[in-house]
Amino acid sequence: MADDRAEMAEWDPEFTRHITSWVGPLIKRYFRAEVRGLDSMPAAGGALLVSNHSGGMLTPDVLVFAPEFYERFGFDRPLYTLGHYGIFLGPMGDYLRRAGVIEASRENAGAALRSGAVVLVFPGGDYDSYRPTLTANVVDFAGRTGYVRTAVEAGVPIVPMVSIGAQETQIFLARGDSIARRLGLNKARLEILPVSVGFPFGLSVILPPNIPLPSKIVTRVLDPIDVVAEFGEDPDVAEVDLHVRAVMQAGLDELSRQRRFPVLG
């Protein structure tokens, strides 16, 4: 627990305020971003925000949502984002932790939730953010359900959130998960070898990362789910996960119906 608290303690509200004040407007303008449904967020206390993940390596999800969250709730209420351990390697690690990104683990998430913070998790991770363009509007967590138990153990609601548009910032051809397995990359916790096409490099196999097109991004927060109230004290994790994904898929389908043109929105 001490280590978990130490990682949370690295969050720097003033640094986060600075980042959101200058990066937030740029991201919002570039992607013409909208965040809807913030009134659905619990007014106080811990909550596990569960979202689809989009946009490949340069996913803008957090940079779209975080500035709107802090504008609504202020910097007295931390927003922690769970991230793969690999993103903390190198000099960027310290900056990410100061901005509220913590290494993805049940222990870290639980400690943050019990402290009363909001924790943002993308259960599908890179597998989701590199989903092929043909399935851009499909919620897919790759069978990962640990977020359900995390919410139950911390005694907090699950708040579903969906986003559309970032998967149109380039053309995603394939995740390359079968190739990654054959190459043994899964031993290094690298489960995919994604192939995409974009600007300015054209075909990319992970690297080099193409510059995202300025696709319009719309993010919507959905109504909280009180897991214990709806599914009991000892819920079936698979059943809860199925329900959460169904709610999210319905929300994403609605955003898709409202979208007139790719990229333009």
Image (cartoon, rainbow, N blue to C red):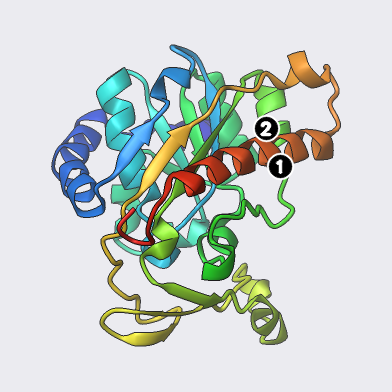
Closest to the observer: 214 or 148?
A: 214
- The 10 Å Cα crowd at callout 2, few under 14, some 14 to 19, many 20 or more, is many
Q: CA distance from mark 2 to mark 1?
A: 6 Å
The quarter of the displayed image where residue 210 is located: bottom left
x and y percentages locating residue 91 in the rendered image: 29, 61
Q: Amino acid at mark 1?
A: Gly
x and y percentages locating residue 131 in the rendered image: 56, 65
x and y percentages locating residue 62 in the rendered image: 37, 45
Q: Amino acid at mark 2?
A: Thr
Closest to the observer: 71 or 256?
A: 256
Residue 150 is marked as 2
Residue 83 is marked as none
Residue highlighted by disc 1: 146
Judged left or right of residue 240, residue 199 is left
Q: Residue at x 45, y 41 (%)?
A: 81
Q: Residue at x 84, y 26 (%)?
A: 235
